[in-house]
Image (tube, helix red, strand yellow):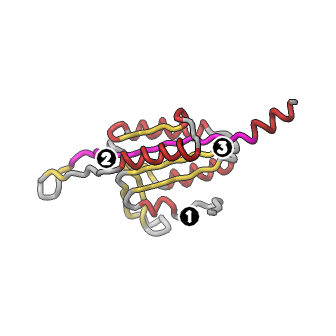
Amino acid sequence: VALALVLGSLAHADTYALCIGINTYPATKGKDGKMEEHSLKGCINDAQTVADWLKSKLSVPEANIHMLLDTKATGDEFVKEMKWLVHSAKPGDQIVFSYSGHGASISDKGAQNGRKSFIVMADEQLIPGKLFGDIAKEMAKRGVNSTYYFDSCYSGGMARPDWKGIEVR
């Protein structure tokens, strides 16, 4: 009976997701002194669509899906929710991260392609793409599958194969 309970618990994998969608960004003063608008359209819808798909197609419980939408998607909230995401999963589980919003890129001679990519939170905090490679590597060591979706400028930099030890399938 004990063996059956242990095997049954191993067969049950959970999915945990963090979906971020940011439409509203602060306006900034341009070089000509005029205010420039940086807000986007559709990012909140993207995050909601991913969450709805996870619930309807993969039967992920709503409690296992956290969302950061618009101005609530600050750097501090991102850190808090990423901690929840990676600490919730146990071996055999999977995590899903989706992001729709602005991306950024800066020159970096040490990077594989000479640039570093970032996602941009609503409070203009930059989250480095390298972080997601580090998380994926740690999750793989723990036996947790991870999937990342990025809909932003420079999102191709999030998937650079310069993360040593990660097998891409």
Residue at the image position 45 percent from the left and 52 percent from the top:
128
Q: Amino acid at mark 3?
A: Asp
* Callouts 2 and 3 close, C-beta under 8 Å: no
Q: Nearer the viewer, residue 85 or 79?
A: 85
Q: Which residue is mark 3?
A: 93
Q: Is residue 8 above or below residue 46?
A: above
Compared across the picture, whether 76 is left or right of 166 comes to: left
Q: Secondary structure at mark 3?
A: loop
Mark 2 = which residue?
Answer: 23
Could you tell me which quadrant the N terminus lies in? top right
Q: Amino acid at mark 2?
A: Asn
Residue 101: x %, y % from top left: 36, 51
- Circle 1 sits on which residue? 162
Magenta stretch: give its range: 11-27
In percent of width and height, residue 98 lies at: 47, 49
Determine which quarter of the picture holds residue 68: top left
Q: Residue 46: horizontal and vertical position, in percent?
A: 40, 49
- Identify the mark nearer the N-term, 2 or 3: 2
Between residues 88 and 3, which one lies in front from this camera angle?
3
Question: Secondary structure under badge 1?
Answer: loop
Nearer mark to the viewer, of 1 and 2: 2
Q: CA distance from mark 1 to mark 3?
A: 25 Å
Callout 1, which amino acid? Answer: Asp
Residue 125 can be seen in this image? no
Q: Is residue 26 left or right of residue 159?
A: left
